[in-house]
Image (cartoon, helix red, strand yellow):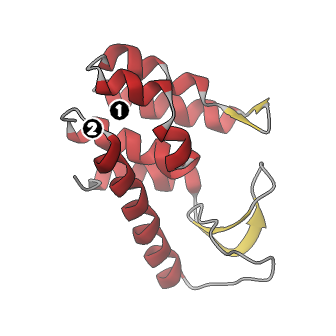
Amino acid sequence: MKTSKNGIELIKKYESCKLTAYKCPAGVWTIAYGHTYAVRPTDKITQEQADMMLICDLTEAENCINAVSRKELTQNQFDALVSFVFNVGCGAFRSSTMLKLINMGKFTQAALEFAKWNKSVGKVLEGLTKRRESERLLFVK
């Protein structure tokens, strides 16, 4: 599966785009739409580069979900999971209770797992709480 326009808009809503490197709440150097790979403090990019980074990062999240999900997903479920994996990473998703529930076909219970992922460095963040609720609502839609 591939991310739909709705999924991309959800990610853009919560990631926003910054063309100069900054530290995210977890203290990780970040640029573009939440891109963290090989970012240096002095990095500056163009909007075109940011859009390309988003496509690459989306592909990583899509590949992860397609590889580990054993149940057929709706487009909305897939889009919600792409936003989630884009943010928390494939490793965290791969070992999550959410994925275990999805693979058992327990989608209602899996949807409740989004709310548990609203912390960064042990601290609840309002932005993550809102994002997880948006992802959950899309997942159950």
Counting residues from the start of the chain, the first of labels 1 and 2 encountered is 2
Tell me the amino acid under the disc marked 2: Asn
How far from the left and from the top, in percent, is residue 49?
51, 83
Q: Which mark is residue 76?
A: 2
Tell me the amino acid under the disc marked 1: Leu
Q: Secondary structure at mark 2?
A: helix
Q: Is residue 86 above or below residue 56?
A: above
- Name the foreground residue: 114 vs 20: 114
- Name the foreground residue: 48 vs 27: 27
22 vs 45, left or right, is right
Instruction: Please state, as top left, top right, bottom left or bottom right, where the C terminus lies in the image.
Output: top left
Q: Which mark is residue 18?
A: none
Dividing the picture into quadrants, the one containing residue 17 is bottom right
Q: Tell me which residue sits at (60%, 60%) in the image.
A: 34
Q: Is residue 67 above or below residue 135?
A: below
80 vs 122, left or right, is left
Q: Could you classify mark 1 by the number of other residues whose Cα lies within 10 Å: few (under 14), some (14-19), or many (20 or more)?
A: many
Do labels 1 and 2 touch, CB within 8 Å? yes
Q: Tell me which residue sits at (62%, 84%) in the image.
A: 45
Q: Which mark is residue 138?
A: 1
Q: Real-space Cα distance between discs 1 and 2?
A: 6 Å
- Name the foreground residue: 88 vs 22: 88
Q: Secondary structure at mark 1?
A: helix
Q: Could you classify mark 2 by the number of other residues whose Cα lies within 10 Å: few (under 14), some (14-19), or many (20 or more)?
A: many
